[in-house]
Amino acid sequence: MFESIRVASKGKASMLIVGQFKGESLNTETKALDADGSLVKASKRADANGALGSIVEVHGSNGYERALIVGLGSRDGFDAGSLRKVAGKTGRAIAKVKAKSANFQICMALKKLKKSDAVDAFTAGAMIGEGLGMLSWSFDSLRGSATNLPTQTKLAVHSCCSAFNDGVERGLGFAEGTNIARTLSQTPPNIATPMWIAGEAKKMARKSSNLKCTVFSGKKLEEERLAGHINVGKASENKPCMIRLEYTPARGKSKKPIVLVGKTISYDSGGLSIKVGGGMVGMKRDKDGGCGVFGAMHIIANVIKPNRPVVALLVSAENSISDEAYRPDDVLTFRNGVTVEITNTDAEGRLVLADGLCWACEKENPEYIVDMATLTGGVVVALGSVFGGMWCDDDDLRAKIEAAGESTGELVWRMPHHEKYNAMMKSPIADILNSAPIREAHPIQGAAFLTYFVEEGVKWAHLDIAGTHALKKDNEFMCAGPSGFGARLLADLVERS
Ligand code: BES
Ligand code: ZN
Ligand code: ZN
């Protein structure tokens, strides 16, 4: 959509953007910008109804080439998050006419909101920045000679105040992390192998002095007894690795780190328990837990810069097929001593996650752990693409994740742990099996499996994002494809911890 977006504090924009609530006329503060009366006149047109995301275009208004009156929806219960949608619709209208600069004066319309619905200029700017930034994502690096790419324009964002501008910068930073996650997700599996993803993590760490990247592969995986990686990754030429990214704060170095673990299966063919029918297509996105964590680390290191350490573990392998593949009937021993009978090689994500969770508990002394994974198709059946599934029995951590979900719009819904689900995972020959013969409640079984790798007393949340990691069709500010789910959620969570 846009080649780049920057905040401009000088000069005059070619386009003016003002807001109008549903069923209302322009407010006094907005009218103050309307010396020539063209906005008021246009705001009385039948199509100027203030419906959320509606756009009324006014040519030659108040010295601007164009003005847009954008609908903010209902005043009562106004939610800052709806400004992302406003940004998406407005951004499309700006791009359509190839305007290079726009002056966002929507804060004017937000002046006299009810106390409970009030939105400050910084937050408004952040939502607009996020919406515009996420709208701008595209993935064209693999288009070849048979495609004509549309020309993109650079956009300068002007606004009413420095607080709004600062908000836009923050929002653009959150969008950048999300877009990095989307680009990784979109990269095909013949390029985005585990070691290639490790290379991208190293590149990111080189650019930020507060980030360090270590990659565990080959013999190191053996030495560290990372049985999940070794076995899931065995069949592929593209070797497995665990990618450890560490954020070190300027202050607060000695605090316990927050540990984020992301399932990063570069391709999930199912292995010997091969996926059938159409089940395999799209499984390049089985790395999206890790992509979200990667994007979150970008936001953490560049925007939030919290006063505490954060460690990310991207547990990465390709689940492929060869004569060296791990098989149903194999028994694996994990680094915490738990033995797992493999009953289905397509339940591979939990095996690499098990390594990450054991490692986090044993080596990182975590404040808390959050893992994020495209773990089960069952969570898509249960929650669709609206909520991610969340398993977390710690009230405080859960409240923080829920609050982060509300503020980023990346929603999560609590699912249960119960010893009866744990009992379903018992194996007749090992401690547990990786996939129970009874298929019922299998997202919950997946979470139950993971509990065997989290030490007693460690605060932990598991997020199953198989339903939310990609969009089937365009929404107001994102196109169909990867959503980058979790990058903003986890960054926001770290900020409020
Ligand atoms: N990667 C899949 C889960 C998935 C499904 C992600 C749809 C995204 C969209 C996972 O590894 C898997 O295959 N899960 C199995 C688990 C079963 C074998 C216990 C599933 O969901 O059927
Ligand atoms: Zn699988
Ligand atoms: Zn998988």
Image (cartoon, rainbow, N blue to C red):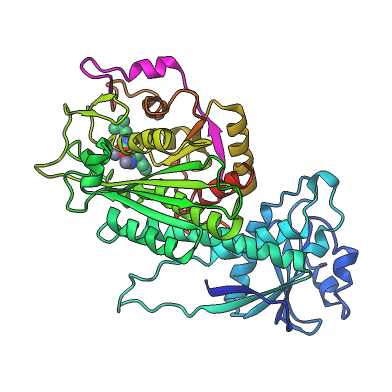
Q: Residue at x 30, y 17 (%)?
A: 426
**Residue 198: x, y in percent?**
33, 56
- Residue 421 in the magenta stretch? The answer is yes
Q: Residue at x 60, y 60 (%)?
A: 130
Q: In this orientation, which residue lies closer to the viewer: 424 or 297?
A: 297
Q: Quadrant of residue 87?
A: bottom right
Q: In this orientation, which residue lies closer to the viewer: 142 or 242?
A: 242
**Rendered view: 114 above or below 97:** above
**Rendered view: 102 above or below 54:** below
Quarter of the figure that contains the C terminus: top right
Residue 462 falls left or right of residue 154: left
**Residue 39: x, y in percent?**
82, 73
Q: Residue at x 55, y 60 (%)?
A: 302
User: Which span of residues is magenta-colored?
Assistant: 409-433
Residue 422 falls left or right of residue 400: left
From where the camera sits, is residue 477 visible? no
From where the camera sits, is residue 326 visible? yes
- What is the residue that sits farthest to the front in this orientation? 254
- Residue 303 in the magenta stretch? The answer is no
**Residue 423: x, y in percent?**
36, 15
* Figure quadrant, ligand 3: top left
**Residue 175: x, y in percent?**
55, 60
Residue 15 falls left or right of residue 98: right
**Rendered view: 15 above or below 322:** below
- What is the residue that sits farthest to the left in this orientation? 323
Q: In this orientation, which residue lies closer to the viewer: 120 or 478?
A: 120
Q: Residue at x 16, y 26 (%)?
A: 329
Residue 123 falls left or right of residue 386: right
**So how many labels did they put on this image?**
0
